[in-house]
Image (cartoon, grey):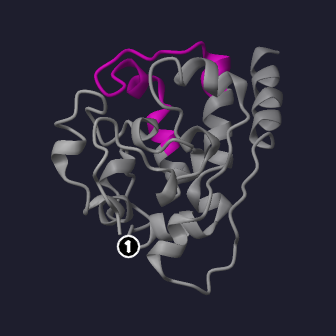
């Protein structure tokens, strides 16, 4: 019965997210893709459990196989240095939501770019290691991120991307804490 309830919850959560991204893939200009939004997260279980410790990453930032690996019980025990164990029903529901809204499932402009160059057998566990992420951030000096006590990590998206929680990573919405002079143009 618990497993059935978890599956029902998972199905409901899987459909509770929507994307503002345009599925048209005609334009390959990276700057135009910076203007696309990712899926907004409307999954309270995911927000409650994951955003209590870190930024709740949009599901379409990784392929479904990555979310599946990240959400395994053994992986959650050592979740990037922390114990993030969840009750089995919650784990299954969150995992189903993330996988159903993953980059390889949604197939938005953003996700297509994120997945480009990634083999079907690669299972990235860090968004910050994806080549597309690296290319978009290569112009930002490390001192403004890892050397910045108000940012500290490339994975702290919402520290600089003021609308990240809403799924928007537009360039004009970037505000790097403690640096009023950085110009992206």
Q: Residue placed at 16% from the left, 44% from the top?
A: 143
Quarter of the image with the N terminus is top right
Above or below — where is 84 with respect to 71? above
Q: Is residue 71 above or below residue 140?
A: above
Residue span colored magenta: 67-92
Q: Residue at x 67, y 60 (%)?
A: 106
Q: From the viewer's perspective, tell me whether residue 36 is left or right of residue 81.
A: right
Toward the viewer: 162 or 10?
162
Residue 56 in the image: state x and y as whole percent: 53, 33
In the image, residue 146 lies at what x, y percent? 20, 38
Q: Answer whether residue 151 is magenta in the image.
A: no
Instruction: Tell me which residue sits at (66%, 50%) in the image.
Output: 39
Residue 93 is left or right of residue 83, and the answer is: right
**The residue positioned farthest toward the bottom in the image shown:** 26
Quadrant assignment, res 89: top right
Question: In which quarter of the view is residue 13 placed?
Answer: top right
Which quadrant of the view contains residue 152?
Answer: top left
Residue 140 position within the rendered picture, expressed as x and y whole percent measured from the top left: 25, 56
Query: Which quadrant holds the C terminus?
Result: bottom left
- Expressed as whole percent of the image width and height from the top left, the position of residue 33 reads 53, 70
Helix, strand or loop for disc 1: loop
Q: Which residue is mark 1?
A: 117
Depicted 166 relative to depicted 81: above or below: below
């Amino acid at each position: 019965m618990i497993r059935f309830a978890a599956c029902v919850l998972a199905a409901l959560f899987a459909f509770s997210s929507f994307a503002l991204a345009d599925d048209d893939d005609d334009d390959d200009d990276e700057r135009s893709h910076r203007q696309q939004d990712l899926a907004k997260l409307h999954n309270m279980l995911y927000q409650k459990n994951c955003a209590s410790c870190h930024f709740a990453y949009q599901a379409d930032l990784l392929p479904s196989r990555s979310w599946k690996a990240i959400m395994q019980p053994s992986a959650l025990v050592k979740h990037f240095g922390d114990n993030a164990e969840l009750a089995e029903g919650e784990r299954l529901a969150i995992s189903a939501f993330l996988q159903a809204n993953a980059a390889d499932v949604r197939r938005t402009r953003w996700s297509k770019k994120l997945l480009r160059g990634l083999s079907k057998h690669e299972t990235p566990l860090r968004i910050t290691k994806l080549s597309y992420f690296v290319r978009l951030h290569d112009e930002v000096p490390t001192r403004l991120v890892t050397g910045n006590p108000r940012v500290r990590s490339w994975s702290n998206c919402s520290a600089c991307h003021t609308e990240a929680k809403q799924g928007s990573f537009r360039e004009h919405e970037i505000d790097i804490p403690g640096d009023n002079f950085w110009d992206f143009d």
